[in-house]
Structure formats: C-alpha cells, structure tokens
Amino acid sequence: MGLSSAATGDGVQLCVFDLQRGQQEGQELDKILYFYPADCPILLQLSVIGLCEGIVTFTRIFSPEEDCEVIESEKHSHVFYQAETDIWMVLVVEKNKENELTWRCGALQGILKEAHSLFAMFHGPIRTLLHKQPSAELARGHLRTFLTDYLSDFNVGKKLQFPTYRDSLKERGTVQMLTVSREVALDVQSLATVLGSCLGNVTCQSLVLFEDLLVSTTLPPDDTLNLYTYAVLRLTPRALYSNASSWSYLRKGTSVSAGQTSSSSNGTTAGERPLLREKLSKGKDGFVAADFTATEARCAVPSTPILWFQQADECMHLCIYQHKSLTILLLVPASSVINGEEGITHVKKAMLENKLTRGWGGENAYHVSGYRYLLVDPERRVSRASPPGKVTTLAKDSLLALNMLRQEVDLEKSRYKRGDPCHDKDFEVCIRTKNNAWVIAKISQGRELYMALEKGGETLLYASTAVEKFSNRYCEGAFSTD
C-alpha cells in the first residue's frame, strides 16, 4: 500500500480518531470520530486511519515526548495534530506538480489546531463529549456538522483549497491588534468598563474589533484568540457581507460538496451551528444573530450561543453588536439570568460613533511603503502584517520563495526546540530570488519577522539595511543588530 491511501476526488482527506477506542478486533470502526470526505468507502477510511495509527505508534518508540507532526511520502503529505490525549486529527494532502511547493506544513497544522480550538469553544472538549455519551454519537454529530461548516471556507468550486504560497505573509493562530492613539485608547477603555458593568452586579467580559483588528479584550490570551478567530471568520462586517473568508485571498464557495450535512438531518438548529455562514445576519437593531426558518420559533431577543472558555474556565453567553466597521462581543456568564432588553439597552448607550470610530486607520494603518512583511510574536500569539491588498501586488516568484523559506524556518525551529526547548535560537536568512527580489526571515528573542522586498538593490547590504530601518522604526529595535 505504501505511505498513502487511494486518493479522493480532490486529493484531500481529514480524519479525527480516538486511540482509546476500537482496540478489539472487529471494533475498528469505533475509533473513527470524523472522516472527510464522508462518502469515502469504509475500507478506505479504515486503511487511512490504520496507517496513521501505525505512524503515531512507531514514532512514539523513538520520540515518546514529541508528537509526530509531518510525514512526507512521494505522493502525499500527512500532517498530524494530537488535539487531546489520544485524540488525533490528521490531514492528508495529495501532491502533484502544481501544488507540491505551494503549501507549508506548519500552516496546514495550524488549520487543525484552529478547528479544534473553535470546536472546543462551542462544544467543549471531545473527550468530555465521549464521556457524556460513550457511544460517541454525540461527539460524531457535533464534529460532522462543525467541521463540515468549517471546511466550507476552503471550498473552491468542488475542491478544497488550503492555504498556499499566497498566504505566506499571514499567521494563523495569532491575533492582529490595532494600535490606536492615546485619546482613542481612553475611549476604548471607558467602553470596556461600561460593557463590564452593563448588567449591574454581573461582571461581563468583552472584545472590541475594528474591521478585522482587535482593539480591546478583557479575556485571557487563549480565549481571546479563539473568540477573535471566530469573529474574523463569521462576525465582522467583511465576513458577514462578503461570501469569502477573511483568512484567504481566494474566492470561496459556500458548502463542501462531499459529506454536506443539513441542519434537519442531524437534529441541529442554526443556533447550534455557529459556522453556518448563510444563517448569520445583522438585524435592524445592530445585533448579529442566526436567521431562523419559518418553522423555527424566534424570540423577541435574538438567541445567544453559549461558549466555553477553557482558560477562564467558564461558560458564557455571546451577544454580538455591530455598527459600521465596529464589532463588539459581549460575554455574559451563563450562570446568570440574562434580561435581554436590559442588556441591549445598556450596550446601545455605549455605542458612541464619533468617539469610537474617529481616527482609526483599520488594516491599512500597518502598511509600510516599500515593504511587504509579517511580524509574529509567538509567545503573545500576536501578529502584524501588510494589508492583504498590498500583498497581492507581489510577484508569484517572490511569494513562492518566501513560502519555501518559511518552511525551512519551521524545520529549523522544530530541530532546535527538540535540542534545547528552554531557549530560542536567533538567526537571519536573506535570499535573492530569480525575479531579483529579496525574501528575508529573521528571528530574534523569539519574535519572527518575514519580509519580501521587490524593486530593491542587488546587494546583501541593501537587504540588511532595509531590515535594520524597519526594525528601528516599527519594532522598537527588536531585530536590529546593535
């Protein structure tokens, strides 16, 4: 059989399986919690998962402390992620001459991490669902609908299109912050205080976004990242009013052709499918909620989904308000009783358009003339990047070279982490591409800078000087050699 299973229609397979289940002969199907495409023959599903389980078991012999992350074969890339103890997510992508050099395995693993984090925020850990219903039908049902809706963002025509070289100046799993003036920061701080106490004795949490950038949060970092990711995927004006994901430059479809699941067939309502794009809309009152069909009852106050925040260790109701480019996410502890009208009234009083939108530059505030860049702080899980519209001006050769450079940096970081996990390695790489551009990667004290410079000088001195100028002006000298 080799390190591959038969290719599916679009050359992609995604599976979730539990190594604690199906260990007896004849019960192998029990370990499968999710498989894409859903119409894949059972024998092929068992073959793929059996192979993946064998790889996990084999690699643990030589590296018991480190999870297997990637296995490359001649025809496929297998990307692994242990989402929870003994619960694995594996993405199998078929290679061909057109795409072999266009994706980065670190970005593919980022998709698996993001999908699991969002799933847990809405449904809780998979293991908890399995304990609640040992037959696994509850877990399988939630995974089937949630991952089907999540994968719809990557649907192009009838095939899945995952992040490619065009996304090499994006970093999944980070928050993009908006830097504001001191005057605006005081306004935002005042708003956060009002939101926190808008229901009297009940302490609420909040996130404030302008366009797709985070302005304010009162949640811990991990919970902030998960809710921010959901907001950018589904709740911001760009996500609501365009039929495309904010994470990609490619135009997306709205459904996954294979294994598409309807609400009625799974006994779920729109409110239980938070990623179902077609059901989300903004009402006349400015609040975003799920649209209901004529047969579904709708209360006067829009239904609010309940989210589980792992770091805060609390379940909260989510209330979404939107005004122009501003999106406010109000979180109310689920243990409290929500008086919908009271909460809405207080939140509306806090929507002071002149104060909240004056002088905010949005994503173009981070454009630096002559530079196309990505700045990442993995420890804080924060990134800053050139606006997507500016990145599209780069030549294909520049983006391909940058994507390959990032892949090499990922491998170098992984090797160094295994050898010395307590310290970060500083290094810099500058490459002259065949279209006479410079692609640069520099890591300093854990922070990462990636850059593409076109129409620049031919010498290495030019590239180093460009990095130095950028670092001193925009990064407080974090990447300077002095």
Image (cartoon, rainbow, N blue to C red):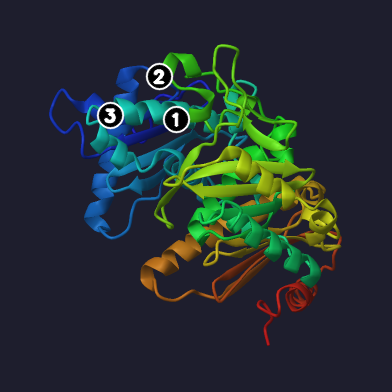
> Is the N terminus in the top left, top right, bottom left or bottom right quadrant?
top left
Q: Earlier in the sequence, mark 1 or mark 3?
A: 1
Visible residue check, residue 15:
yes
What amino acid type is highlighted by mark number 2?
Cys
CB atoms at circles 1 and 2 under 8 Å apart?
yes
What amino acid type is highlighted by mark number 3?
Ala
Q: Is residue 284 left or right of residue 121?
A: right
The residue wearing badge 1 is 13
* SS under mark 1: strand
Image depth: mark 2 or mark 3 in front: 3
Give x and y (percent) for residue 35: 39, 27
> Is the C terminus in the top left, top right, bottom left or bottom right quadrant?
bottom right
Q: Earlier in the sequence, mark 1 or mark 2?
A: 1
Visible residue check, residue 103:
no
How many residues crowd mark 1 within 10 Å: few (<14), some (14–19), many (20+)? Answer: many
The residue wearing badge 2 is 40
Would you place residue 65 above or below residue 14 in this image? Answer: below
CB atoms at circles 2 and 3 under 8 Å apart?
no
